[in-house]
Amino acid sequence: MRKIAEYIAVLKNKEFSLLWISQIASELAYQMVTFSTAVIIYQETGNTLYVSLIVILVSVAPILFSTIAGFVADGYDRRKVMIMSHSLRLLLGVGMLFFFPFPLILLPITFLLASIAQFFEPAQASSIPALLPENQLFIGNSFFSFTRYAMFLVGYTIAGPLLVGVGPFAIFLIIIGLYIVCLISAWRVRPLREHLPLDAGQSVREFKKSIAAIPKKLKEGFVFMMQDRVVAFLMFQVSFIFAVERGFISLAPAFALDWLAIDVSDISLYLILPTGLGTLAGTVTTNVLKHRMSRNMMVTGGTLLDGFALVSLAVFAYGRGSFFPDTFSATIVAIVILAFLSGFADPFIIVPAQTVVQERTPKEKRGRIFGNLVLMMNLLGLIPIATIGVLSRFVPIVSIVAGLGVLIVIVGFIGVLYWRKFRLEPELQAGV
């Protein structure tokens, strides 16, 4: 009952709840746009090249803009940044309503939506400490971490049936409605300018100075990140695991069909759904254990569990029919259990890491730090996608999956050695 009361206490904070509602609508709209656009473009062209272009464009947008977006979040009222981001996405959503039959127009619109989203993310993440007291930060980040995974699950699950049932026009009407919810929710949050040295708006001359100062400000963010051993290593762990998981996602269809003998259309049911349920359970568990485990133990434990789940999935696929039963029911049980464990591990990595970064970062630099994190995650994420595309021609996919899992396990053990070597555990004790 005490834990439930803690969750309720956070949600009673009206402005935090408004920020959370804005995130829910934003994440759901983003996932529905990504899935729906890919399907519509493939249906209109019959060419997988365009679908690949969408993945590339969505991955390139954070690389180009996430760090600059962090600077914007540090230099301006974060509420205004979110309002402007939602307003622009609303306009683009209206554009998609009329141009969805034309794939060559949908591609740049999708890129613009992904680019604008980069400005919303660091402004949002940097605003959580301004709306919650320090003793509620962990729970607040848990809400946001779970929402990210839950909306991925919901968006990809409902977009397909909606496309078939009501058609693209109705899908984009729903997406426009979600952007309106984002805009209204952000509008009702108070101004978020505590990190600014000035209360009033900047003049034209000050604005020009701020633009000229972008390189210096970005450098300051990277220097701070590298000088703080705790922040630097946590960001490395989160970025590396994100990159490996993105590599696995690129292999998932072929791995499911060739090694697990399940249809690609069943991936959502047997892989994504249990992953989402595992994330929900992991989010609840991290909050139960936050008073008993240090933050670095949570991150390291989650990393090892995530790697174990991926390696086990590869071992099962390789040994199916030899060491393990070669039946559909046995395969589904194994996939569901291991997907659940992988989802369960993710909040142990993300929630404490994000909380620590927020706690250790000066409020005037938080936007840049989170922008840098998004940049690192997406830059590293391109490496396995490019490498795996070449490797898969010469190496069995099951071996690549096992290798990805082993890499995550190695990073987990590196974490154990790192915290011991620099004796940083006292700085990351259990939350209060």
Image: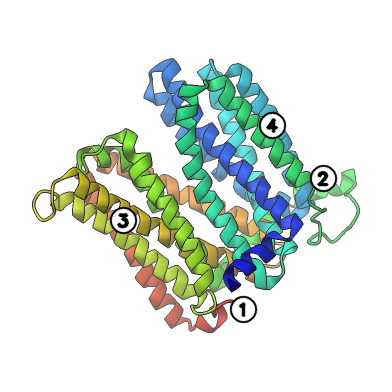
* Outermost residue to the left: 322
- Residue 90's mark? 4
Q: Disc 3 marks which amino acid?
A: Leu
| Image-quadrant location for residue 192 | bottom right
Name the secondary structure under disc 2: helix
Helix, strand or loop at label 1? It is loop
319 vs 12: above or below: above
**Real-space Cα separation, disc 3 to disc 4, in angstroms:** 38 Å
Looking at the picture, does residue 101 appear above or below residue 290? above
Q: Amino acid at mark 2?
A: Lys
**Image point (54%, 16%), residue name:** 102
Mark 1 or mark 2: name the one nearer the start of the chain: 2
Q: Position of residue 302 (x, y in %)?
A: 41, 66
Image point 62% across, 59% down: which residue? 369
Q: Determine crowd level at label 1: few under 14, some 14-19, many 20+ residues with C-alpha closer than 10 A.
A: few
Q: CA distance from mark 1 to mark 4?
A: 40 Å
